[in-house]
Image: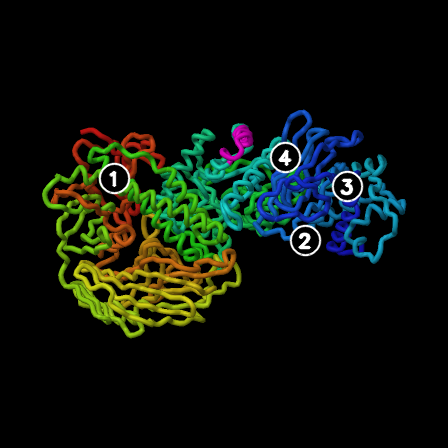
């Protein structure tokens, strides 16, 4: 034998190319198409590529001598679409039509065709040459097709196995099988058969008069294929006994359908419909096939769009083939949503799945999110979920995640069993082939803890899902040596097995805290308007519910659920919407939806405030103002009253309390010039360039800044990949500071003073009003930007007179501490990180916090805290962050650490100022709805119970402390025990908080 293994594999591959040219025995073109009602010739371009095109073809009849089970419909109509076949017997069938799904089986001999298509490819890419490319009936030589696929898998496998000793005998088996073929040779037919092949298509001129429909294999030929196939299967099986499977993979069918991304939401609904038709058909033909689909929102859309298909899916769920999964309303980003948003993802997701399919979920399925909040394990456990799946952590560019089957331990110590797999052949959209299977097993690091890894397969990201061929490949692999053994599973069952396998395994690795993704860091900043609206929408709904519950405690009827409004917020938390990685159309819809939520929330707040006012106002007497603090932290009396009048008095408003105030006297000591603004607590001095030259804390007698504060920098921001997603560490190497063009005093007190600074950068303007209230050391930077530059990252930087090796960043229901140094590669990779309402740098006894009302991207390096203000990539939205956006961030020097220094209260105030409404009488009245004393807590939510029985109060320990809280309610109300996130009683009522623990109690009427 003079040929190498590789040469022998090449030779098999070349023979395969020849064989495949015989797999279609006969074909018959379908040429009677209409496009939106007008005739369209085969091969013709679409008359228009706008909108949805409807293709129709009248009666098709399969030739009488073609076996139906060997007949297929081959279609490429030029885009992505939903194909429907209407059979003469009245039955119907639907199929998704896309570049990966173009060949369809038939169940009757006569039918008509229709298809709704868009001139787009699965990733939303316009098909600029959309044409009716290909339409025919094909009689497939099934035996030959089966043999060709087997031989192809053999070639792929030996190439993957490379030096394995099984390769030689596998090549022998393939060559032996080929020698058994009795192949046609007659020139005229042979040349006509091979004419469409790659090699013949490169020939200058093929012979004239080639037969258009050359003969397929004759009976002798077909019998020889059958013999070759059997010989190869038998030889492989015998080799499998010598070289048994290495490892085991559990296969779950998957069709990652991003809820919106490179296409708008309306197209997602059609994508789901197409994909789900394909999946149901595959299940009919392949009883062993298992498919998982997350996202309650997708099912809710489908129930509206195609009730008949939805009913069939329900049947498949009942039979166990179709697995709803994930427990959540969508697959959300997990860096940015607040804790109560995750609660609602689980509450409304689990409730929907239970109501619709009769079951809650135990697996959180987030294959594709850009980093994972350490708040999740506790929230998942309290939402009935004990298992977590993702593969995205394996996308980190700098450091490899060390585990792939492990306990993920959250902030509070809660754990979920977590699994990832690492497959470069499609990731979670795995192909079924030797590379994906061998690589996924090889990469499975924790195989000594559990002998099987999951692998999800099927075309995805734009939907599509598994194909018939993928299932055929699985079946064939059952005969292969070395390749891991395969079995179809439901994901939840796989996790149940894995839980059992590791139950007594004290060595199972534990990953504690955040799973930071060392990639896609710019998703914390891109599409600033959507992020800011998202924050406002979250706060508006949480506040609307809180104020509704306060009114109920005063005797108003308990308000209805805001589930419909929450669903809009949850939907826009999808992992390509909130992160800013979608196209323009998505943000037009997202901004409109989130604006509508803010308006609806504010309308509820106004309505409920008037109820509270009605209950507390005494009528007559001095006109006053009802002031409501909707959070737990006591706050200074500070707000913008009707008409925008700023008020900052000396009083404090306790948590979840309504007070009626008369005239508010300003806290004393506020003054302002063009270069200074100060109050009793702090003196701010501006440099001529508009930065802060000094922030002097009068009470502590110390300077908060180490260098000029609020430096505004514009950096060239051109990542090598993933424009909307990524910012690279090297952005700092090319930037310029933007100095002030104008500085003027714009508000002179006595409640609030302000200096407005205008900066100009090329065609853009940044207008900042530096505001100081009379009763706080918090310095607000109310920012209005009119932006017209591309591929610039804008940052605000604050060098602080603080030394600490770590900074504190708010996350969902708690905080994350991250180093301020870059000792290791893990720390170097965290050059841009998430924070919610604040980041804080504190040394013993003193600190400075950087707060915001709708930004997420931060850096903390040495003594500097920085905030990303906007960035403006061009892909996939060429106009990302173009135009106007407004937001506020703030610098807050404080004594003590961030919690004792009042950072949480200031962050709450910045994000949801005290509420107010005019009242008649009652000045001096103060009424506390829920009095929480003892250990300081954060309010996650205070909401009407979904079942109408009372209200749910949910609090969390925000800083990592332990202690007991006392909860006082108005008379006539009591705590009726503790509930989980799904509002089921969980027994008892715990008021002793451990670090970062969350507790929810049901509040009902009664003594
Ligand atoms: Zn995705």
Q: Give the range drawn in magenta.
A: 302-316
Question: Which scheme is used to colour this image of the protein?
Answer: rainbow
Give the image location of residue 276, x and y in percent: 56, 37
Overall secondary structure of the magenta section: helix
Foreground: disc 1 or disc 2: 1
Residue 583 covered by magenta stretch: no
Would you name the residue on which mark 2 appears?
162
The secondary structure type at the circle numbered 4 is strand
Q: Residue at x 37, y 71 (%)?
A: 738
Give the foreground label among 3 and 2: 3
Instruction: Please tell me whether residue 339 is drawn above or below residue 797 in the rendered image.
Output: above
Which badge, 3 or 2, comes first in the chain's sequence? 3
Q: Is mark 2 within 8 Å of ligand 1?
A: no
Q: Which mark is in front, 4 or 2?
A: 4
Q: Position of residue 239 (x, y in %)?
A: 70, 42
**Whole-percent x and y of residue 897?**
24, 58
Q: In which quarter of the image is residue 702?
A: bottom left
Q: Residue furthest bottom?
A: 688
Quarter of the picture containing the N terminus is bottom right
- First in residue order: circle 4 vs circle 1: 4
Circles 1 and 3, Cβ within 8 Å, touching? The answer is: no
Residue 504 can be seen in this image: no
- Nearer to us in this view, 190 or 238: 190
Do the numbered discs 3 and 2 sit on residues whose CB atoms are within 8 Å? no
Nearer to us in this view, 648 or 437 = 648
Mark 1 highlights which residue? 608
Residue denoted by label 4? 84
State the CA–CA distance, disc 4 to disc 2: 45 Å
| Residue at x 47% of width, y 45% of height | 366
Q: Which mark is residue 23?
A: 3
């Amino acid at each position: 034998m003079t040929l190498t293994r590789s040469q022998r594999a090449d030779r098999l591959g070349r023979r395969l190319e020849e064989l495949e040219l015989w797999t279609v025995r006969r074909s018959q073109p379908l040429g009677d198409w209409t496009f939106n009602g007008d005739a369209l010739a085969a091969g013709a371009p679409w008359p228009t590529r706008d909108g949805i095109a409807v293709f129709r073809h009248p009666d098709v009849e399969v030739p009488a001598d073609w076996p139906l089970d060997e007949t297929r419909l081959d279609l490429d109509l030029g885009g992505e679409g939903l194909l429907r076949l209407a059979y003469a017997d009245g039955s119907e069938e639907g199929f998704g039509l896309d570049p990966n799904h173009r060949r369809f089986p038939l169940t009757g001999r006569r039918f008509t065709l229709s298809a709704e298509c868009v001139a787009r490819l699965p990733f939303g890419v316009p098909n600029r040459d959309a044409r009716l490319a290909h339409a025919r009936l094909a009689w497939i030589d099934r035996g030959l097709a089966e043999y060709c696929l087997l031989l192809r898998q053999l070639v792929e496998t030996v190439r993957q196995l490379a030096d394995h000793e099984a390769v030689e005998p596998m090549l022998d088996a393939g060559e032996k099988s080929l020698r058994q073929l009795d192949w046609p040779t007659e020139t005229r037919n042979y040349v006509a058969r091979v004419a469409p092949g790659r090699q013949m298509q490169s020939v200058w001129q093929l012979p004239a008069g080639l037969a258009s429909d050359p003969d397929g294999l004759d009976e002798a030929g077909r019998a020889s294929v059958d013999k070759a196939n059997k010989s190869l299967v038998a030889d492989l099986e015998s080799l499998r006994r010598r070289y048994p499977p290495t490892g085991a993979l559990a296969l779950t069918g998957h069709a990652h359908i991003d809820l919106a991304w490179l296409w708008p939401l309306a197209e997602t609904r059609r994508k789901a419909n197409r994909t789900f038709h394909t999946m149901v058909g595959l299940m009919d033909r392949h009883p062993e096939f298992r498919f998982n689909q997350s996202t309650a929102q997708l099912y809710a859309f489908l129930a509206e769009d195609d009730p008949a298909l939805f009913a069939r899916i329900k049947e498949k769920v009942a039979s166990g083939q179709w697995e709803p999964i994930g427990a959540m309303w969508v697959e959300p980003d997990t860096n940015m949503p607040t804790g109560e948003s995750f609660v609602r993802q689980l509450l409304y997701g689990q409730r929907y799945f239970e109501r619709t399919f009769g079951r809650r979920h135990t697996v959180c399925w987030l294959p594709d999110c850009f980093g994972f909040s350490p708040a999740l394990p506790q929230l998942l456990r309290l939402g009935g979920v004990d298992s977590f799946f993702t593969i995205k952590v394996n996308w980190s560019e700098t450091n490899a995640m060390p585990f792939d089957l492990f306990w993920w331990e959250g902030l509070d110590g809660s754990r979920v069993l977590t699994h990832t797999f690492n497959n470069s052949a499609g990731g979670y959209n795995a192909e079924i082939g030797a590379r994906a299977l061998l690589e996924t097993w090889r990469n499975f690091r924790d195989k000594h803890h559990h002998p099987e890894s999951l692998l999800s397969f099927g075309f995805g990201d734009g939907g599509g899902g598994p194909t018939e061929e993928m299932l055929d490949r699985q079946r064939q692999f059952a005969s292969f040596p070395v390749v891991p053994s395969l079995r179809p599973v439901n994901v939840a069952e796989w996790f149940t097995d894995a839980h059992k396998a590791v139950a007594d395994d004290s060595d199972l690795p534990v990953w504690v805290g955040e799973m930071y993704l060392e990639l896609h860091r710019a998703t914390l900043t891109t599409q600033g308007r959507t992020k800011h609206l998202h924050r406002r929408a979250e706060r508006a709904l949480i506040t609307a519910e809180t104020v509704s519950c306060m009114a109920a405690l005063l005797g108003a009827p308990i308000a209805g659920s805001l589930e419909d409004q929450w669903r809009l917020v949850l939907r826009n938390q999808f992992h390509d919407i909130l992160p800013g990685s979608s196209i323009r159309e998505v943000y037009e819809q997202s901004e409109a939806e989130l604006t509508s939520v803010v308006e609806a929330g504010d309308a509820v707040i106004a309505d409920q405030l008037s109820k509270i006012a009605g209950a507390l106002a005494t009528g007559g007497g001095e006109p006053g103002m009802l002031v409501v603090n909707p959070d737990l932290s006591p706050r200074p009396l500070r707000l913008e009253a009707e008409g925008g009048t700023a008020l900052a008095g000396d009083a404090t408003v306790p948590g979840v309390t309504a007070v009626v105030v008369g005239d508010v006297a300003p806290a004393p000591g506020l003054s302002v010039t063009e270069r200074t603004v100060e109050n009793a607590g702090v003196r701010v001095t501006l440099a001529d360039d508009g930065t802060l030259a000094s922030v002097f804390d009068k009470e502590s007698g110390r300077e908060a800044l180490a260098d000029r504060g609020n430096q505004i920098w514009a950096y060239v921001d051109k990542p090598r990949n993933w424009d909307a997603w990524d910012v690279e560490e090297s952005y700092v190497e090319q930037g310029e500071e933007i100095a002030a063009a104008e500085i003027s005093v714009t508000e002179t007190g006595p409640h609030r003073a302000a200096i407005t600074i205008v900066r100009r950068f090329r065609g853009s303007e940044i207008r900042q009003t530096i505001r100081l209230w009379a009763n706080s050391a918090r310095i607000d930077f109310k920012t209005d930007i009119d932006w017209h530059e591309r591929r610039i990252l804008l940052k605000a930087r604050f060098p602080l007179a603080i030394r600490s090796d770590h900074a504190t960043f708010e996350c969902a229901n708690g905080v994350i501490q991250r180093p301020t140094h870059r000792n290791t590669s893990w720390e170097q990779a965290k050059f841009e990180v998430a924070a919610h309402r604040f980041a804080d740098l504190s040394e013993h006894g003193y600190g400075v916090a950087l707060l915001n009302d709708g930004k997420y991207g931060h850096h903390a390096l040495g003594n500097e805290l920085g905030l990303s203000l906007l960035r403006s990539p061009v892909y996939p939205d060429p106009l990302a962050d173009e135009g106007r956006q407004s937001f506020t961030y703030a610098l807050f020097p404080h004594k003590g650490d961030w919690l004792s220094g009042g950072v949480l209260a200031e962050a709450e105030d910045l994000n949801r100022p005290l509420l107010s409404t005019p009242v008649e009488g009652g000045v001096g009245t103060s009424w506390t709805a829920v009095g929480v004393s003892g250990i300081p807590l954060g309010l996650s939510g205070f909401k009407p119970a979904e079942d109408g029985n009372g209200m749910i109060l949910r609090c969390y320990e925000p800083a990592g402390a332990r202690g007991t809280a006392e909860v006082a309610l108005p008379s006539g109300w009591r705590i009726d025990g503790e509930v989980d996130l799904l509002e089921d009683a969980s027994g008892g009522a715990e008021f002793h908080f451990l670090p970062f623990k969350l507790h929810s109690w049901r509040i009902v009427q009664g003594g």
